[in-house]
Amino acid sequence: DTAVSQTPKYLVTQMGNDKSIKCEQNLGHDTMYWYKQDSKKFLKIMFSYNNKELIINETVPNRFSPKSPDKAHLNLHINSLELGDSAVYFCASSQKGRATGELFFGEGSRLTVL
Amino acid sequence: AQSVTQLDSQVPVFEEAPVELRCNYSSSVSVYLFWYVQYPNQGLQLLLKYLSGSTLVESINGFEAEFNKSQTSFHLRKPSVHISDTAEYFCAVSENDYKLSFGAGTTVTVRA
């Protein structure tokens, strides 16, 4: 069983469309994250949720709306897609409140906006 | 706020040669330090971490990193690399419970 799974793995869409990426973890972790990796491989945190509560929102445009229906899921919805949104989006999870802990990453969802 | 600088963006190296990947951080408080590895088309995996105690930490596949507080560094080394070590390596630092900040990454390409 995959610990952190994301769907879809690949997403190609036109500018202006709305799309969603889903993430699920079966590790029993309380904290989940979305990271964006750009074309230069730079990783930047977007959001962090702890037990369904938003903890970190790193000045991400409000076109990006995360939703956590339960602590095992953190989905990312993006409205009005722009060219600059093209990137690989990684979901991750960790045990609650543990800066000392390990992040477990999904395999990424590659979004291409045309 | 913390930041992480990886001094080398690309490191080509021959198989069985040693490699060192440099990482410096800036923070006004105590931090936890990590190295993650990303193999092609995969997510990141933890390689090793420094939390406290011995400043030299090791991974199961031969990598080691040394925390140097005075130089605010956490360089990663391996005495002899394999082709399978070809990957992207990320240094990361954590100050609080919910945020891990990554460096820009170092691409290691191992050639036969």
Image: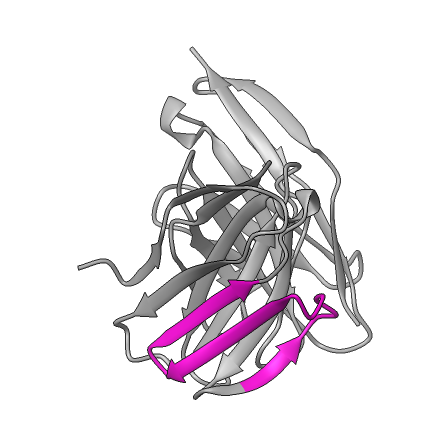
Q: Does the magenta stretch include residue A67?
A: yes
Q: Is residue B61 magenta?
A: no
Q: Is residue A93 above or below residue B8?
A: below
Report which quarter residue B4 is drawn in: bottom right
Percent across and percent down for residue A63 are 65, 66
Q: Can residue B13 be seen in this view?
A: yes
Residue visible at 51% across and 69% down in the picture: A33
The quadrant in which the C terminus of chain A is found is top right
Residue visible at 57% across and 72% down in the picture: A65
Q: Can residue A102 be seen in this view?
A: no
Lateral position of residue B52 relative to residue B63, left or right: right
Q: What stretch is highlighted in magenta?
A: A54-78
The quadrant in which the N terminus of chain A is found is bottom left
Lateral position of residue B48 relative to residue A27, left or right: right
Percent across and percent down for residue B25 are 75, 58
Residue visible at 55% across and 75% down in the picture: A48
The secondary structure that most of the magenta stretch takes on is strand
Report the front residue among A74 and B56: A74
Q: How many labels does the image show?
A: 0
Residue visible at 38% across and 56% down in the picture: A106
